[in-house]
Amino acid sequence: MNNKLFVGNLSFKVTETELQEVFSQAGTVVSVSIPTDKYTGKKRGFGFVEMSSQEEAEQAIKALNGRALAGREMSVNLARPKEKTGDNRSRAY
């Protein structure tokens, strides 16, 4: 059961509260996160929304994919599991 959504093409001005309000129109929102760059602290232009069921997640995709929020059209898809790289060594640049 996958009820976590990837939300791409977000405006850097969108807050987690705003994202939750928009997605609550499609059902019950369990959690919202908008990752930030670990060095600059700036938002990265995408987020994750977890809905309470797979049906609500699918409904959110149908209702919100391509919808404008803060002047940008969101891209809403099912989130894929994070891939494990197997390489935990730090890299010097």
Image (tube, rainbow, N blue to C red):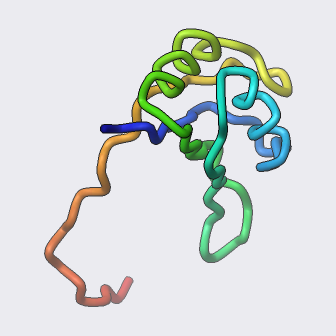
**In the visual, does 36 lie left or right of 55?**
right
**In the visual, does 36 lie left or right of 25?**
left
User: Residue at point 70% right, 13% down?
Assistant: 67
Q: Nearer the viewer, residue 89 or 30?
A: 30
Q: Position of residue 50 (x, y in %)?
A: 54, 44
Q: Quadrant of the N terminus?
A: top left
Please, is residue 36 above or below residue 34 in the view?
Answer: below
Please, is residue 71 above or below residue 8 in the view?
Answer: above
Please, is residue 56 above or below residue 66 in the view?
Answer: below
Q: How many marks?
A: 0
Q: Position of residue 5 (x, y in %)?
A: 49, 36
Q: Position of residue 44 (x, y in %)?
A: 63, 52
Q: Nearer the viewer, residue 4 or 74?
A: 4
User: Residue at point 83% right, 47% down?
Assistant: 17
Q: Nearer the viewer, residue 69 or 50?
A: 50
Q: Quadrant of the C terminus?
A: bottom left
User: Residue at point 19% right, 68% down?
Assistant: 85
Q: Quadrant of residue 78?
A: top left
User: Residue at point 75% right, 40% down?
Assistant: 20
Q: Position of residue 6 (x, y in %)?
A: 49, 38
